[in-house]
Image (cartoon, rainbow, N blue to C red):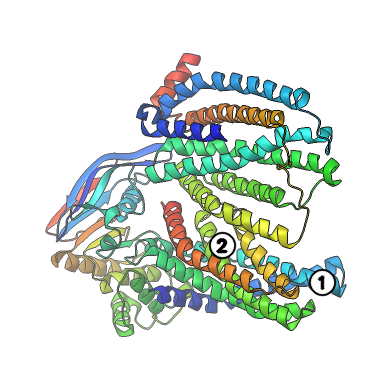
Amino acid sequence: MGRKTSQGTQYLDMAINWFKYSSPASFYFLAGKMIPLFSVAAVLFCVVGLYIGFFVAPTDFQQGEAYRIIFIHVPAAWMSMFLYVVMAVWAGIGLAFNTRLSSMVATAIAPTGAMFTFLALWTGALWGKPMWGTWWVWDARLTSELILLFLYIGFMSLQAAIDDPRRADKAGAMIALVGVVNAPIIYFSVKWWNTLHQGATVSLTQSPKMATTMLTGMLIMSIACWMYAIAVILIRTRAIILERERHTSWVGELQGAKS
Amino acid sequence: MPTLQGIDLTCIRGDRKLFSGIHFSLDAGGLMQVGGPNGSGKTSLLRMLCGLAIPAHGEIRWGGSEIRSLGGAYYADMTYLGHLSGVKDDLTALENLRISSALAGTEVDASKAHDALQLMGLGGRDLLPAKVLSQGQRRRVNLARLLVCNTVLWILDEPLTALDAAAVKLMQGVMERHLEKGGMIVMTTHQEIEIAAAATQRLQLA
Amino acid sequence: MFFRITQRDLLLAMRRRSDVLTTLFFFVIVVSLFPLGVGPEMSMLRTMAPGVVWVAALLASMLSLGRMFSSDHVDGTLEQMLLSPQSLSLLVLGKALAHWLVTGVPLVLMAPVLGIQYDLSADSLLVLTASLLLGTPVLSLIGAIGAALTLGLRGGGVLVSLLVLPLYIPILIFGAGAVEASAAGLGAAAHLSLLGAFLLAAVVLAPWTTAVSLRISME
């Protein structure tokens, strides 16, 4: 989690101080240099994290080996929520300051965020089967995660339906901001609903005593997820930049150099 | 009387630059006719002047202030008639006129609205639902707003389409009177029309 | 001006009464379909009733969202609203009020009758009506944001449901929850006051958000 905030400020610095990189063209080249770094880091952290998760962390005496899915499930769930907020922040900056690059980044984040949400739901179901004997429980967290997936889908469908990229950016920003304001309300209403109905109350993350190695494994996996997310988002942002700037001279030169 | 100024305006639609480097200044009693072939950005320019579209570059000032910062104060001085008539099929001509004027900030009583419609040649038809009116008659309902409004700046997009010769002449008179009183008009038109004005300028978009 | 726009929308709705009735009949039909799907067992229907009525109300209110701005958009009236010296947020509030009067209020009035089909007690019927009375205006207000953002898009009707339905969830939970709580003897006051709070928040925030969205969509 600490990683997330430091990454957040780093991004912010980029938008405010490094004006040079807020132009899509310079960002394109900077991102090109950064992608290999983040990709390598993602693979390394992932290998270490999975090793700890599968071989070092002790077997849980209650849940046996099945619990090991948390090394993917929990980081994915965290990522899905963080990325929605990060997406809304970038989209909001794009709307308020009319910076095209931040809107492009927001658009690039959405599919990755949706992917993590889906992954969290999928692994949650896989974990649920041995734990509760059923693939799906209307647990507050799982339900909220499902609604989060709907929010991502809404954002992406709205942007996909609008042809004009400027309108798509702004309209997407509005729905992302409305979503981020409503998310806590939705979460708490789902929680209330859940307690009212006395449904399954097995908490997914708060095992009474979590071994330090489990926590370490989970944190390392989270870092791996961040690295992966950043690399993929940068790749996607580069693709969006190329598409939107295809008529500018610098993209033309790039094409000329390639062929 | 405030001045309408356009400073270095650029319009980009999709990937195409429609126009750039447009400068103009319109004073009291001035008429600006915007010309150019289809797709040259006439309507886009007019929508910019209304604040409906934001210029990709440059700014528009009313009395020295940027129009977006003025907000409602600018809209109280301006009337825009676009391509779309804004006339509701299910309402009568009279209701249409009164409601659209109220929306623009001027409450018009029934008798005044009736007189305006009468002048536009819609006497006796003002209580018919707009759906039974012809294209030209609907246009007249829309133009009747100019008779009852008390704004300074009129921005008119092809105001004379679908009008017959008599109505064109009528509108010519209405616009001339507005200019005499110190009003301003920005309009696009394909038809050749002579409107007497203190200062006429032509803006040709390529 | 606020009432002027409400009055105009009501006048238009009265000239096209069939649209209003369509929404209402949709609501009635959806609610009546459930017993056919799950069987006529009264105890089960009684527990399902609040949820069924509320989900049907969400769908019915959403169905008519497209009309809120699209006809004004097509004939150019919306352009004129954006150019009005009046505050656009206030105009939007007026339109949302008209939308609620035309689509929400008939649902509220019809709900007790449908509740009887599900054998709800008199207390539950009262709470159901109260929850709908507080909740349906919120649906119109939140729905206005979705309608504004999808203005003029292909497939706007389906898209608006994707955008708006997840945002309706708290209203659904507390609206249906109010009836269940009262049936369980817990009292519905907490749920109803939360719905009231949602309504206040929506009245303050949604018109402004809708106004910004309209300007984005019209640019």
Judge by depth and name the residue closer to the eye, C105 or A202. A202
Quadrant containing the N terminus of chain C in the rendered view: bottom left
Q: Position of residue C70 (x, y in %)?
A: 51, 62
Residue under disc 1 on the same chain as residue under disc 2: yes
> Residue visible at 71% across and 73% down?
C186
Q: Is residue C158 visible?
A: no
Q: Is residue B199 visible?
A: yes
Q: Chain of mark 1?
A: C
Q: Is A21 displayed left or right of B198 in the figure?
A: right
**Mark 1 or 2, closer to the camera:** 1
Q: Chain of mark 2?
A: C
Q: Position of residue C28 (x, y in %)?
A: 72, 74
> Residue visible at 69% across and 60% down?
A193
Three-letter code for the amino acid on which mark 1 is drawn: Leu
Secondary element at image label 2? helix
Q: Quadrant of residue C106?
A: bottom right
Distance from label 1 to label 2 (Cα)? 32 Å
Secondary element at image label 1? helix
Q: Would you name the residue on which mark 1 appears?
A: C45
Q: Position of residue C89 (x, y in %)?
A: 41, 64
Dot 2: few (<14), some (14–19), or many (≥20) neighbours within 10 Å?
many
Q: Would you name the residue on which mark 2 appears?
A: C66
Q: Is B32 displayed left or right of A94 in the figure?
A: left
> Residue visible at 48% across and 36% down?
A104
Q: Earlier in the sequence, mark 1 or mark 2?
A: 1
Three-letter code for the amino acid on which mark 2 is drawn: Gly
Dot 1: few (<14), some (14–19), or many (≥20) neighbours within 10 Å?
many
Q: Quadrant of residue B162?
A: bottom left
**Which residue in the rendered view is the most extreme toward the left?**
B198
Q: Quadrant of residue B168?
A: bottom left
Judge by depth and name the residue closer to the eye, A132 or A209. A209
